[in-house]
Image (cartoon, helix red, strand yellow):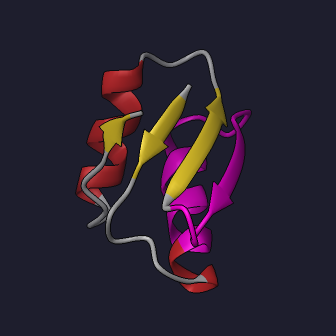
């Protein structure tokens, strides 16, 4: 699944986004691309659970 995160603008943001996702699914594979503000996630969780975790971490997102 893929998400767009307007607030992810740098490598530090990408690390925070990755940590937020892996906090709810430690087995998730996360590939963040700050220039495009996109993150690709391979997870068994529902997209809504990922969106909720990102929102809680301060990175509102939407499924792309």
Q: Quadrant of the C terminus?
A: top left
The image shows residue 32 at horizontal and vertical percentages of 64, 57
Whether the magenta-drawn stretch holds residue 24 is answered as yes
Is residue 2 found left or right of 57 in the rendered image?
right
Residue drawn at (59%, 34%) of the image = 25
The image shows residue 37 at horizontal and vertical percentages of 48, 61
Q: Number of callouts in the render?
A: 0
The image shows residue 49 at horizontal and vertical percentages of 35, 28
Whether the magenta-drawn stretch holds residue 41 is answered as no
Is residue 17 found left or right of 41 in the rendered image?
left
Q: Along the line of sight, which residue is nearer the eye, 3 or 21?
A: 3
Vertical position of residue 64 compared to residue 61: above or below: above
Q: Along the line of sight, which residue is nearer the eye, 25 or 35?
A: 35
The image shows residue 17 at horizontal and vertical percentages of 51, 61
Vertical position of residue 11 compared to residue 56: above or below: below
Residue 33 picture quarter = bottom right
Q: Which residues are magenta?
A: 14-36
Q: Along the line of sight, which residue is nearer the eye, 10 or 45?
A: 10
Q: Along the line of sight, which residue is nearer the eye, 3 or 56?
A: 3
Residue drawn at (41%, 35%) of the image = 50
Residue drawn at (44%, 71%) of the image = 8
């Amino acid at each position: 699944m893929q998400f767009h995160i307007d607030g992810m603008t740098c490598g530090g943001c990408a690390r925070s986004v990755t940590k937020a996702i892996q906090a709810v699914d430690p087995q998730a594979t996360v590939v963040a691309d700050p220039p495009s503000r996109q993150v690709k996630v391979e997870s068994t969780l529902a997209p809504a659970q990922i969106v909720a975790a990102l929102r809680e971490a301060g990175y509102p997102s939407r499924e792309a």
